[in-house]
Structures are given as C-alpha cells and as structure tokens.
Image (cartoon, helix red, strand yellow):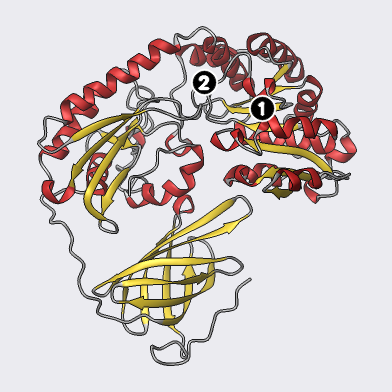
Amino acid sequence: MLSKFFSRRDLFQSGSLLAALGIFRGRLSAGALKIGPDIFESIGVRPLINCKGTYTIISGSQSLPEVKAAMEAASRHYVHLDELMDAVGKRLAELTQAEWGMVSNGCAAALAHATAACMAGADPEKMQRLSLAAAPRNEVIAPAYSRNVYDHAVRGAGARFVDVHTIEEYRRAFNDRTAMVMVLAGPGDRGELGLQVLAPIAREHGVPVLVDAAAERLKVPNIHLAAGADLVAYSGGKCLRGPQAAGLLLGRKDLIKAAWLNSAPHHAFGRPMKACKEEIMGMLAAVEMWVKRDHDAEWKQWESWLDTISNSVTRVSGVSTKVIQPDSLSNNSPQLRISWDGEALGLSGEDAEKALLNGQPRIILGGSSGGRRNGVKHSSLTIMPYMMMPGDAGIAARRIHEVLAHPAGTPVHKPSPPAVNLTGQWDVEMEYVVGKAHHHLVFEQHEGELAGTHQGEFLHGDLRGAVDGAEVWFRSSHKYEGTRIGYEFLGQATEDTITGEASLGEYGTARFTARRHRYGRPGGVVRPVKTV
C-alpha cells in the first residue's frame, strides 16, 4: 500500500524502513577531519539529498544563512543566560504577538519544561521532586488522538496521563491533581475533542493547555493561542530552519518564565536539556527571518522543483505523477507521487528507493510502495520538496529517471511454497547490542501466511507475516503509553528453530533465535502464552 505522507509522528514507523534500506550501513573508511565542503566525507559519512522532509534522524533542516551568522557572532561573547532569555522572550513576544517566548533545546524539551512549569510552577522545592511523581498535581489530561511517541518528554517529569475519548470523560477527568491538558496539533484537534472545545473547559478549572505543534508552520498571530491554548511548542530546526537543537515555547508569560526556571542552566529536572547562547540567538534569528520570508515564493519554488522531477521521470514509459496537497500545517508543502506498474517495469518501489539511497549522490525520499511483502504491481515513490536545496531538483530528477529507465534487472520475486509448518508455540532469545531478553511467539500458519501473537517481557501484540520456502518474515507492534515498539523479524527456519535478525526501527537491530516449545508442534497441545 502507498506509504503515508510522513509527519513527525511517523518517524518511529519509518525507522525500520530506513534501517532496512541501509541508511546506517556501508559508511566510507574514516580519515582525519577536514573543515570545508567535504567535512562529512572526511570522516567517512556520506551526506544525503533530502527529498523526505524534516526528520531529526536525517538532521532536520539546513539552517538559514542568517541563523548561521547569528550563532557564529554569539559564540564570540560571554553573556548571562537569565538576562539573555529575558530579552529574547520579550523580542519573541513582539515578533509572534504571543505574550512571551522562550528558546528550548528542541520541541521535546519545550514540552518537558512546560510540563514542569505546570506541575511545579516556580517553587524550587517542588522542582526537586518532579521526576519522583511527588508533585501534588501530576495528572495530564489528553484526548486519545494526542497520545504519541513524544509523550515521554511529558511523562519524564513524573506526569501521569489520563486519556479521554469523549467530552463527558474529559469533563469528569479534572480533579485536584490535574496539572495540564495536552493537545497534539493536527487533524485530530478539529472534532469533538478539538482545542476550541477543550480549552474553555480547562479554563473553568484553572488548568493550562499545552499544544504540541512541533512541525507546524508558525502562524502570526498564533492560531493555537487564539483558540484558547496557554502554551504552544514548536521545533526550531524544521520549517523555521533555525538550529536543529532548538525549540520554541510561546504563550503565557508567567508559565514561560516558570518553564525557564525549570530548564538549564538552573538545577532542576530540565538541567540536561541545555540551550546555549548560540542556539538561543540562532533561534531568535530564525523567527526574525520567518516574519520576513516570502512564503508564497517558497511554495512556488517547491512546485517548480516537483515539475522538474515530474517532467523527467514521465519520459519513462508507464510512469505517471500526481501532486498531493497537504491537509495540515505540519510538513506543509506539496508532494509528488511517482507511480508505475512494477511488474511491467520490472522494478518495485522499495527497490527504487533503495537504489536511490545507496547510489551516488545519495537521495532519501518521502517513502515508497510496492515490494516483496505486498506485491509490486502498484509501485510508487514520494518526493517531499520541503527541505530540498537549490540545485537538488535537477540532481534528483536525473537520478530517479536513471533508476526507473534502467532497472537493475533483479527479477520480481515470486514466493516459494513453505518448506516448514511453524504452527505452535516458540521461545525466543533476543540478543541486543547490550543485553538479552526472552520473548514468546504463537504462530498459526495457513499455507504461506502467518498470524499469531508476540509476547515480550512485559508488552505484547499481534503478529502477521509469511513463510517463503525456508525464509520467515513477520512483524508486530507493542503499544506502551503513547508510543509503539515495532519489530520486524527475518530469519531462516527448520521445523524446530528459527534464526535471524529483528529490526527495531529507531532502536537498531537484534539477533534472535526461536526454538519450538515442546508442547508447540502442529497437531499437539498448543498452550496459550500468558499475557499482561
């Protein structure tokens, strides 16, 4: 199926694909560091042309020239950080029309500081006990759609989430321990539990509302504050093109001043999340430029880059393109879908994406569809121009055309009849880069298809996969709080053993060995695995 148009929240799911495509492998031999255009190549790292968007794992965005200049100038002086942030807060308020502003060490840090401010205020005694969950107010109400992998920044301060699914649940969730309401900006906040509905009720209870708008475009005046939010957090290194290790917190002056006291250089929960003077001034420069940039001209430039790529790739017989318009303020740019019949062309979308990533120059795309696991007929690539640089479109157009016009010749894979029957119960040893764990699997096999359950040491989830000859592939996802831990297993099987490697997405890989439980043979007694 077509890869979804990625937002910041899809990074976790896309991590396994990046690993599978080899983004972390095959580096050049390292040498002495050379300061200049080839700085990364000098230590054996190959840079990328970014046709994917603003992802931290591929270093976000390229900061504006004005940002680089501000950071370099700031590095040449000493300054008192309390005085600096007070002046920057005032200037951010003038630029954004918010009551106050603060620069943090990324958007996740802004969420952490905002949470700390809502739980402990500016009371130094309460600050010292935040992560112990000892604060008298430590509950954060969130509509279910807002739960996501970045919740860890909120939970780390000792907060406990209270999920709500209806407006009635939301009203009942408030109590003396409620510290904050957290809302994830996006399509979800336009419905029954949208910000405009939630904020007035929170205000009745005297509870502040925090909006996570990490990858969104910054609107002036701020749309979330206008809708009733007290605080809103942005990434500094995405569309604002500020320092990658910077974020922005805007909103109520008293809460933001408390958030600053809960952050570095002050000795509280936020002490490890340090924003230095270079990042602070670089972030201010990025906001200064944001209100000056010609955003309409940038949009037209993105469209022209997509036209360049489209005109090139559609010269290949059977290849078509379509421009997809965004439906939210996150990763807000048009995108290009390049589609073809993988069986007719002899090339799948996954193989094309891999060829572009591993080629020269390296090009990372916004996703692909069509591959060994789901068929190649409906193959596609997605181009996101959001973080492309001048000159990248011509290079991408040429390389994508080359890959589509001259497939490598790898025949389209046709599954073999299964050589083993895995139905039953299996004990698994997972061997991580550090440490081991014992998991359990229950398979039900019907011809070449697998279904069942995967039990970790304290999480569990359903699995789906396939048996292709003696090769076994299956995938599972384990939910915890706002995140999911994804597993993708690939191994070789006998009747009693499976060995191979599991991709853990952003958490790397693990070797695994699965052994059939003595009660788990087909036709025997299959005893259910205890779950939690």
Residue drawn at (48%, 69%), measured in percent from left and top?
Answer: 430
In the image, residue 372 sits, relative to residue 514, either above or below, namely: above
Between residues 242 and 191, which one lies in front from this camera angle? 191
Residue 448 seen in this snapshot: yes
Marks 1 and 2 sit apart, C-alpha to C-alpha, by 15 Å
In the image, residue 216 sits, relative to residue 444, either above or below, namely: above
The residue that label 2 is drawn on is 240
Picture coordinates of residue 90, whole percent (x, y): 72, 11
Q: What element carries label 1?
A: strand
Residue 102 seen in this snapshot: no
Nearer mark to the viewer, of 1 and 2: 1
Left or right, 495 with respect to 130, comes to left
Left or right, 338 with respect to 236, comes to left
Q: How many labels does the image show?
A: 2
Residue drawn at (20%, 71%), measured in percent from left and top?
Answer: 416
Instruction: Name which residue type carries label 2.
Output: Leu
Quarter of the image for residue 97 reads top right
Quadrant of the frame with the C terminus:
bottom right
Picture coordinates of residue 315, whole percent (x, y): 11, 30
Q: Is mark 2 on a helix, strand or loop?
A: loop
Picture coordinates of residue 402, whole percent (x, y): 14, 35
The residue that label 1 is drawn on is 232
Between residues 76 and 121, which one lies in front from this camera angle? 121
**Label 2 Cα neighbours within 10 Å, binned few <14 / some 14-19 / many ≥20:** many
> Which label sits on residue 101?
none
Task: Looking at the image, tell me whether mark 1 or mark 2 is earlier in sequence order.
Answer: 1
Instruction: Name which residue type carries label 1.
Output: Val
Left or right, 57 with respect to 160, comes to left
Residue drawn at (57%, 38%), measured in percent from left and top?
Answer: 188
**Label 1 Cα neighbours within 10 Å, binned few <14 / some 14-19 / many ≥20:** many
Residue drawn at (79%, 47%), measured in percent from left and top?
Answer: 173
Left or right, 63 with respect to 92, comes to left
